[in-house]
Image (cartoon, grey):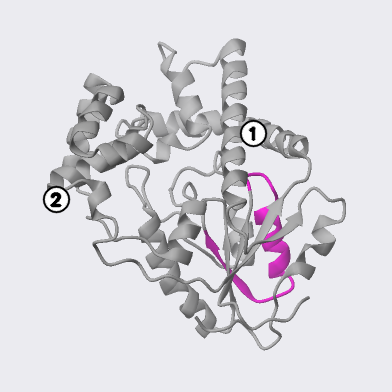
Amino acid sequence: MVASNAWGAWALIGPTASGKSAAALQLAERLPIEIISMDSALVYRGMDIGTAKPTPEEQARVPHHLIDILDPTESYSAAQFARDALALIPAIQARGRWPVLVGGTLLYLKALIDGLDELPVADPSVRAQWQARGAEQGWPALHAVLAQVDPVTAQRLAPNDAQRIGRALEVWTITGQALSSLHGQSPRTTAMPNIGLISFEPRDRAWLHARIDQRFEAMVSQGFLDEVRALKARGDLHPDLPSMRCVGYRQAWAVLDELADPQAPLRPEHIQRWLETGKAATRQLAKRQLTWLRSLPQRRVVDCDAPDFMDTWMDTLPLDPRGPAQP
């Protein structure tokens, strides 16, 4: 391993299904680490199969943080993640352990490295009002409303981006100001640039697509649909919530909406459509992640599809034998 004392934490990043979690567990066998989840889906309780959440046994092998901290009705922002991670990292170091961030939600990583503008805290009542209007009028109509009050934000959002349109309108309702006008005016979350980035990226995109397909099929066989049925049966969730917009869940919800009885067995054509749409959405997510990764020139790239990947990837770690540096 390469020695360096520049890093306060490591981050194992990469597209979905690239082997980050398995690598982190392997690292835990070599070093006293604690894992900080950097995944916007793993924060939710009751969403285990479709998020590929570490099992209870895996979580018992090494301490994990920021998993199962929210109900699916709640939301979690990049700024909240940055604050939580900034509190966890020195606490882990104080225990003489290595903080290792693991995940593919790269907006969270950006918030931690660069800092983010502090924006108004979410107001559930205001958010509910805009969500109700979106359900009634359609999100393109609300996108048109946003274009009138905040054209800068509206220009960068797709007309059906319910989550971000709703948040921009919520901020406008609470503050009377456009979301775009608040950037750069409010205090920012503290930046932590001294994070060593280890990026798992395949040379062969087909290899990653095959991994995605295999993992999605495994989730289905493990009861993914029953998990979504149980969430839908609660009655307090809807497909515009951040939790239910997660890849796989959104597609399963749409298929269940087609059934007169949500508890009825899926017909083969329903299952096939869910597999196709779920896999396609996951591949699109991986494509976006890879594009974002290329914007991080400081990352150290390892070929996660190399035959000897699991035997050699730790040689790339910027390891200081004296222990993790203080931020």
Q: Which residue occupies 44% across, 64% down?
A: 114
The residue singled out by tag 1 in the image is 216
Q: Is residue 2 left or right of residue 286?
A: right
Which residue is at the far right? 307
Res. 288 image quadrant: top right
**Residue 213 forms part of the magenta stretch:** no
Residue 219 rendering spot, x and y as whole percentages? 62, 35
Q: Which residue occupies 78% across, 40% down?
A: 204
The residue singled out by tag 2 in the image is 175
- Span highlighted in magenta in the image: 15-37
Residue 160 rendering spot, x and y as whole percentages? 36, 27
Q: Which residue occupies 55% across, 38% down?
A: 50
Residue 195 rendering spot, x and y as whole percentages? 56, 70
Q: Callout 2: few (<14), some (14-19), or many (20+) C-alpha neighbours within 10 Å?
A: few
Q: Secondary structure at mark 2?
A: helix
Q: Secondary structure at mark 1?
A: helix
**Residue 32 forms part of the magenta stretch:** yes
Which residue is at the far bottom? 322
Q: How many marks?
A: 2
